[in-house]
Amino acid sequence: MKRIKPLLPAISIFCIALLVRIVYNLTVAGHYYPLSDSLGYQVRAFYMLDEHCYCGVPHLVTVVRAPLWPFLIAGLSLIVGRANIFDRLFLCCADAGTCVLIYLFARDLFNKHIGLIAGLIACIYPALYIYTGWMYTETLFTFLQTAICYCIFRIQRNEGTSRRLWILCGVLLGLLSLTRPNGILVIELVILWAAILIWRKRLPKRVLINVALTTLIACALIAPWTIRNYLVSQSFVPVAIGDGQVLIGAYNDKILTTKDYTGGWIRSGLVSQQGVKPLTTGSCQGYAACEVAIGNHETTVAIHWVKSHLNDIPLLMVYHLRNFFTPYTAEADMPLNRFPNGRSSKIVLDMSETFPIPIFLLAALGLVVTLRRYWRELFFVYLVLLSTLGEIQVFYGNARFRSPIEPILILLTAGALWWLTQTAPGTLRWKLSQRSQQLTITRKSD
């Protein structure tokens, strides 16, 4: 019992979070079935089981979409069956794990009381759990990135001496990259984080060996898929292609002139390609090679549009930020939008449109008030925030692109609550107490 007692808060957070997510999936998403991107992930999983082929269409291997989520769906299908509810329950468990990580991070950074509050906020925060009923990669990516942030925090706390944490970090980085191609950027952030802290003498130089070990482990996990991609496409594709389709959909006339698309994304088939030589795929050596050629062509079209609309780019950047910080943006395949008439859907939609606003405000306050005291512990978190903001500026803004940093926003919210309610040095009450004592001493001296 003594061993279990310290774990009770984390277990309680996990159970509450899991219950909220299961209720959401059985009510709002009770009749959900995959469409759009989620169908693409499921199709790849079933083709692996039925045809032993990572394919988007029968017998044609593909390099579109990262493999980890389809592999997990395939594994779950073998164990418990092909009903998508099992995939969504897996995401519920992953997201409940994210809530536990938020609790642990806030507890270790501030104190147990603030950690519990942060964990409970995460349990009921709709911007986290709405993605568990969607079968996209948002929930899995968010869990892995949050685990990496907490792992880096623990590494820094013990000055980089724990080899196990470095190994775990490498595994998490590899899995993150196999979930979404932009996960590779987080590997670069880890290297940058270590280099800056070593330069600032906040970490010993021997940490470089462990950084190299972590990077090698991550690359070792990614490498087999990169080799496979080269064999099927004859091109260097580390994880998956897709940037071209995103860029051509984010940089075109419609996203500036059409009200519903401003600063967003539109399917490439609806985009004009004037001024760029049409692509001919007759010379492609295989389906995957054609996918790469089409992706490169779409990137060329997008770059051409940017060069011819340089005066519009600042306004487009503003649109990207506006969309990114919009509390909730509708998605075609989202259960909230597919089943909007249910009472539970209306309640969750209202929560999704209101809850993020106080979180944004408190997170902004938390960022300011914790900067001086906790910047070293949160430095990697700052890098992740800046990287995410940079990505949405390059691509496009959307509320779901905010999902990987929602745990960070909750952590910063916890920082604001710590500053407002606690009496530790650096908090508001501590400062008021110090000022009161100074005034008392001044009056007595007079």
Image: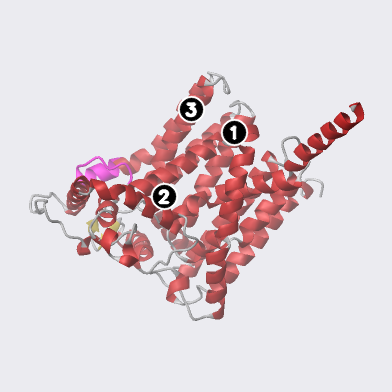
Which portion, as a residue range, is magenta?
227-239
Mark 2, secondary structure of its residue: helix
Residue that badge 3 annotates: 211
Query: Residue 444: where, in percent of width, then height?
Result: 91, 30
Residue 228 belongs to magenta span: yes
Q: What's the residue type where badge 3 is placed?
A: Val
**x, y (%) of residue 203?**
57, 23
Residue located beneath label 2 in the image: 179
Please state, as top left, top right, bottom left or bottom right, where the C terminus lies in the image: top right
At 53% from the left and 41% from the top, the residue drawn is 148
* Residue 151 to residue 329: above or below: above
Depicted 135 relative to depicted 203: above or below: below
Say whether disc 2 or disc 1 marks the residue closer to the N-terminus.
Answer: 2
Q: Which residue is mark 1?
A: 375
**Residue 22 magenta-drawn?**
no
Q: Residue furthest right?
A: 444
Q: Secondary structure at mark 1?
A: loop
Left or right position of 338 against 108? left
